[in-house]
Amino acid sequence: MNIPRTNLPRVVIIGGGFAGMAMVRKLIGEDVQTVILDRHNYHTFQPLLYQVSTSGLEPDSIAYPMRKITRNSKKCLFRMAEVKSINTEKSYIETSIGDLIYDYLVIATGSKTNFFGNKSIEKNGMWMKTVPQALNIRSLILENLEQAVITDDPEKRKALLNFVLVGAGPTGVELSGAIAELKNHIVPNDYPDINPNEMNIHLLEGLDRVLPPMSEKASKKAHAFLEELGVKVHLNTMVEEYDGHLVTTNTDLALKTETFIWAAGVTGAPVKGLKAEAMVEKANRYEVNAFNQIKGYENIFAIGDIALMQTEAYPKGHPMVAQPAIQQGKHLARNIMNILEGKQLEAFKYKDKGTMATVGRNRAVVDLEQGSFGGFFAWFIWMFVHLWFLIGFRNRLVTFFNWLYNYWNYDKAARLIIRPFKGYEKQMKVDKEEI
């Protein structure tokens, strides 16, 4: 791995998501050697992935190079690697680029898509946890519109213009709202051969309301906003199978579609090597105490989505969203320094700053401690908060101007099929031959 030898304590962080990045930024400048490992060389601002998938933003607007975080510190290092397993007895990790000894290990691997054991959905559906997956969805949406223009088969055309999304949490609601705006503002101008009324967006939810984690007031507002945009919401509807062409559910609803997007849940993304009792099997998350120490270990910690800290206020653990991850990352950085300085550890206390979701232009819902509200003001707050938490001045500036341009022109400038999704292997062969 070519990690410099040092007399400083070594803190190894697995994962460059919100939790890992928050911790790294706190430890820069401290008397520790910090090594952060991730499969990608960039941090992804996941809350805005849906805008990449619907042509609102280019991926470099929401991705930030890891090495820009670590480049000003000789004590903070980044390595692009996949962690294979942890050897807790000898305190080292095995990775795709070699082994690394640690003094303190922090697991911040986040979450992955949860298919609840449904193999047909996992095989045939689309999901959105990474930038490449968001680009796949973007390509598929645009390719299906192009195919709908030229097909003579009315049934095939209907399937190409049917967009089915599963899961009415923030991701599903925001993504379906963005596709609806694509239908309402882009299709009439770019695709005059398509009647926008032929394009249908279906949002399926297994529970009895959209945005189940949010208040009932916010849920009702979001539902109304979706219907205003033309999204067909199907509640108490669970998908049983998707074979690549037909969606079947637990009701009489069956939908033919070539665009099926799964946004119905996430589960932890653990690393091999820890004791079985450290894992809460149902949640696939590590059980941690108030100091984020994994059960059964003193020098191994978990933060963010992968950590399950049970408290009186959160008996099932904290929400698997950005704020708990950021707060835990910062807090654990302070506690690591407390350990090294011989001070007492401080228990983590989550401060809920509110929950929000956008449902398209001028439409959003916000839950705060003071109450719930929706509409333009909520949408403005949503934009401000997301700009604030984007890493990097350039990313904030580019995203802001993209939003400004999109707002005034009702446009989504990034509707490019750079990397075709359908027949991708064939396209790669063509690209290689051209080179």
Image: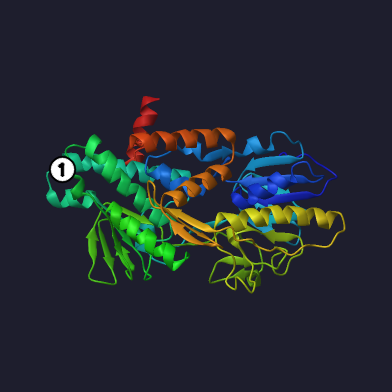
Which residue of the protein is positioned furthest toward the top in this rendering? 435
**Three-letter residue code for mark 1:** Thr
Query: Is 377 displayed left or right of 312 in the figure?
Result: left
Counting from the top left corner in percent of width and height, residue 118 is at: 38, 65
Q: Quadrant of residue 56?
A: top left
Residue positioned 60% across, 50% down in the render: 18
Quarter of the image where one finds residue 339: bottom right
Above or below for 25 versus 226: above
For the rendered model, the colour scheme is rainbow
The crowding category of the residue bearing disc 1, from other C-alpha atoms within 10 Å (few below 14, some 14 to 19, many at least 20), is: few
Where is 170 relative to 413, above or below?
below
Could you tell me how many numbered marks the image carries? 1
In terms of depth relative to the viewer, which is nearer, 380 or 252?
380
In percent of width and height, residue 308 lies at: 61, 66
- Across and down, in percent, residue 310 comes to 63, 71
- Compared with 117, 396 (above or below) is above
Residue nearest the viewer, comparing 387 with 106: 387
Q: Residue, x 83% and y 62% (percent of image)?
A: 344
Residue at the (35%, 51%) spot, across then down? 177
Percent across and percent down for residue 258 are 26, 51
- Quadrant location of the N terminus? top right
In what element is the residue under mark 1? loop
Q: Report whether residue 92 is seen.
A: no
Residue drawn where x is 33% and y is 71% of the image: 236
Which residue is denoted by mark 1 in the rendering?
A: 151
